[in-house]
Amino acid sequence: MVILETECQISAAMMLPAVLVFLLATSALGIPDWWKTSVLYQIYPRSYSDSDGDGNGDIRGIINHLPYIKSLGVGVVWLSPIYSSPWQDMGYDISNFKDVHPKYGTLDDVKELIDKSHQQGMKVFMDFVPNHSSDQHPWFNASRYSVGDAKDYYVWVNPKGYLGGKPIPPNNWLSNFGGSAWEYDEVRKQYYLHEFGPYQPDLNYRNPKLVEQMKDVLRFWFNLGIDGFRCDTVPHLVEDSSFKDEPFLPGCTDPNNRGCLDHIYTENQPETYDVLKQFDEMIQKEYNSTRYLVLEVYASLDKVIKYYQQQSSPFNFFLITDFKRDSTAVELAKVVHDYLQSIPSGMWPNWVVGNHDQSRVGTRMGEDLIDSMNMLILLLPGTAVTFQGEEIGMTDAYIRKDQVLDSVGRDPQRSPVQWDSTKNGGFSTGDKTWLPLNSNYWRVNVKAETAKPKSHLSVYKKTLELRRNLKNPTDFKVNTYGKWVAYFKRDSETESYFYVINLNDREEMIPTSVIGASPTVYIASENAGYSEGNKISEYLVLPPRSSVVLLAPNKMLNKLLRSA
Ligand code: NOJ
Ligand code: MG
């Protein structure tokens, strides 16, 4: 059962079946209020804004755009990795956990960004990458040569044997980026584990000294003023120490396909949950519960839910993994309900539809669903997460073969932010940008959308503004009308709002009696064919893949609900 903060407590017995009931949460749990009420805005620093014309976004570029970020209404800014790094996995390969890549700026710039964000009432998260370091990290070199404490900071295992003098990897584990998860080191004459690229050796969380080092990394940034972290790839933190082969999933036999293996030894191990508990306790004890962690976990719902702790939530990726362009409204309602119903008492939901690892919403779901998806996550109860550029409806850029940087194809969604229609979309004055921009920047850009009365950006901002006035629901349910229409209600102090979405590829007519009021259009997606203020009488007519927020006075609604 989901528990959210509300003003009153209502009895479960009074509720209709399948309605989620939200009870009064005790504030003892220490989830900061700002986490609950905020929208988390993900900045991918190399693509945000380039202040010095070298073709790479930088911290100064973010500072310059703080007024824009503030104008969106978001409350927490999360920076993807800005650490020292050889950039073999775009900063998720860190060579110094306590310093900044010179292309991004200096520690002083970070401090300035934190202070200026705080002055504007916004919190700042960094990316914490606990599973691995870069192979260029001094620890790794020391470890290869078995020098000092770092000797045991990585996962080293002897070869299983030798074939014709050549070492054989310890087991069948595979890397998330393809190939074996083991790399033989000629110096140490052992294999090291890398669950991602061979340049990203896995850290050894069975070593308490390493755990302490990583806690120190958190402390370093907390002490600089960072409010929390998005924690990278946490299910992989610890592996089973028996190093046994992972079994094949039924019907799957390809030994080179990671999807064929059942990851019973490399993911979501009990020890992984223990390490996270230590981080959680540290925040409670040393930072008086004022900081927060959000965890990157792609796993089945039961496993995801187990990651909830007092100071941390796992990301909810189910609107990415289980909700697709072809999904029906019934499926949408199920994804939302299954998630909300599983959240442990007192814990807080969140909603993610995009990040730097996923094809953008406009490309994955179709441009027609851009507004609807933004409206959906902003209006569902809980913290919403927006990847930079989604607010203006950016789509994946075309990357020519000679421009490819990422080995697993994630460049298109990482293209620079489109600020205006000038050279490089206003992202950089340089002659070259690190990744090409989407050529649609002449049309899709912040400046053009700010000037237009109606745009993806205007819909985004208006929905976020509405979100601020909404009370936490005392009950919440996504309803469906037929196979393709979904709707739900949210209340402010004085009004009731209905979000209605048509996921069909043709027009749908929804009798207003279904919703229970004769409402007014409050927000309409660009393709909904309605203007704000339009009165709806008998039928709401929604074009394919469009949505509206309807406004109905509370009183009328409550009367209708009572008579239902
Ligand atoms: C998840 C990050 O989001 C992704 O970009 C990265 O490649 C892997 N973790 C490895 O750190
Ligand atoms: Mg730059």
Image: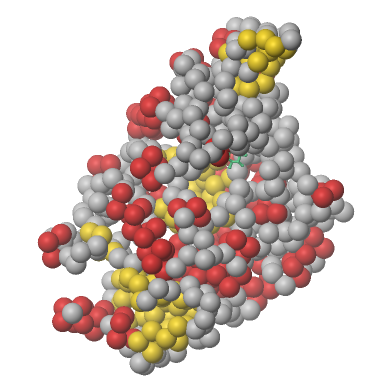
- Nearer the observer, 55 or 111: 55
- Nearer the observer, 478 or 460: 478
Which residue is drawn at the image coordinates 39% and 80% (left, top)?
Answer: 550
Residue 350 coordinates in the image, percent (x, y): 41, 53
Residue 396 coordinates in the image, percent (x, y): 68, 59
- Residue found farthest to the right: 431
Q: Is residue 458 left or right of residue 1?
A: right
Q: How many dots with numbers?
A: 0
Q: Quadrant of residue 10?
A: bottom left
- Nearer the observer, 84 or 385: 385
Which residue is drawn at the image coordinates 64% and 27% (left, top)?
Answer: 180
- Quarter of the C terminus within the rendering: bottom left
Which residue is drawn at the image coordinates 44% and 68% (left, top)?
Answer: 328
Colour theme = secondary structure
- Residue found farthest to the bottom: 537
Q: Is residue 257 left or right of residue 469?
A: right
- Nearer the observer, 358 or 314: 358
Residue 551 coordinates in the image, percent (x, y): 36, 80
Residue 436 coordinates in the image, percent (x, y): 78, 55
Q: Is residue 299 above or below residue 17?
A: above
Which residue is drawn at the image coordinates 50% and 70% (left, top)?
Answer: 372
Residue 40 visible in the displayed image: no
Q: Is residue 339 left or right of residue 127?
A: left
Residue 267 visible in the displayed image: yes
Q: Quadrant of residue 423?
A: bottom right
